Amino acid sequence: MIPIIAISNLINGVIAGMLAGRIFLHHRKTHTDEHETTIGAHYFVALYSSLAAMWLLYAVPGIFVSNITTITFSQIVGNVFVYITSIIAVQIVFVSINKKFLGIIASTIILIFGLVYIFGERLYALQYIEVVSSPYVYWHPNSPPWLAIMTGVTAMFGTLIFIATFFAYGLYARGNSAVFSRAIHLAGGMTFLLSASTLYFIFSNSGGLVTTTLASLFGIIGLLVMLRGIQY
């Protein structure tokens, strides 16, 4: 059987990691003075690295391990990175608009939901289920749907803040074509990532293979579009 979902996630994880490395190396090369730096570049390295870790953890089943306990653990940790990524996303927004206190509040809300998720997974302690759809095989969570839905809603919370802020900023600065382009690419890229998280965490229970594959594709498209908006 072919672990098609894991393969898709592996490709996404590798590409996200490579893009994170590209941002880091280019930023380091063009900003030799450590005091002359673009704060956003460091946050975007963290954002892409977190997404890479998430996707690589999702790629564990069927490629690196077959033990169901290890698979379950890797997928839960992968979901935790969804919360970490959401925190980084809102930090990018509020650092950009110089509202760090609001960023702390939003990050705290996401952190609380993340802790609830970890507690819920620990409470139910249900292993993932192997699903065979010949010639493919993938693994599906067996925990109550509200845990996956909460993860998806939390991701939506962070991404909607990101999208709304940069889209509004782009419209505000539309007289400056460079700023407008960067802002719209950031908002547009995150819109693809929002679509990916919606498909993966909310509709994957009914769509399974097709929706999870589409989520992976939307995710990598989002990263590539957003890359065009990063000033590094």
Image (tube, helix red, strand yellow):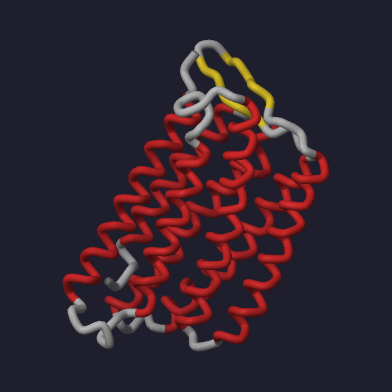
Residue 127 in percent (x, y) is at: 71, 31
Would you say residue 207 is visible in this rendering? no
Image side of residue 158 versus residue 217, left or right: right
> With respect to residue 89, does 74 lie above or below?
above
Image side of residue 147 versus residue 90, left or right: right
Image side of residue 124 versus residue 11, left or right: right
Image side of residue 152 versus residue 20, left or right: right
Residue 164 in percent (x, y) is at: 55, 71
Dividing the picture into quadrants, the one containing residue 115 is bottom right
> With respect to residue 21, does 71 lie above or below?
above
Q: Total number of numbered labels?
A: 0
Please tell me which residue lies in front, 80 or 164.
80
Q: Residue furthest right?
A: 123
Q: Residue at x 44, y 40 (%)?
A: 217
> With respect to residue 62, does 168 lie above or below?
below
Residue 14 in percent (x, y) is at: 35, 43
Would you say residue 14 is visible in this rendering? yes
Please tell me which residue lies in front, 158 or 34.
34
Q: Residue at x 61, y 58 (%)?
A: 83
Please tell me which residue lies in front, 80 or 158.
80
Quadrant placement of the C terminus: bottom left
Q: Residue at x 20, y 84 (%)?
A: 33
Residue 52 in percent (x, y) is at: 43, 49
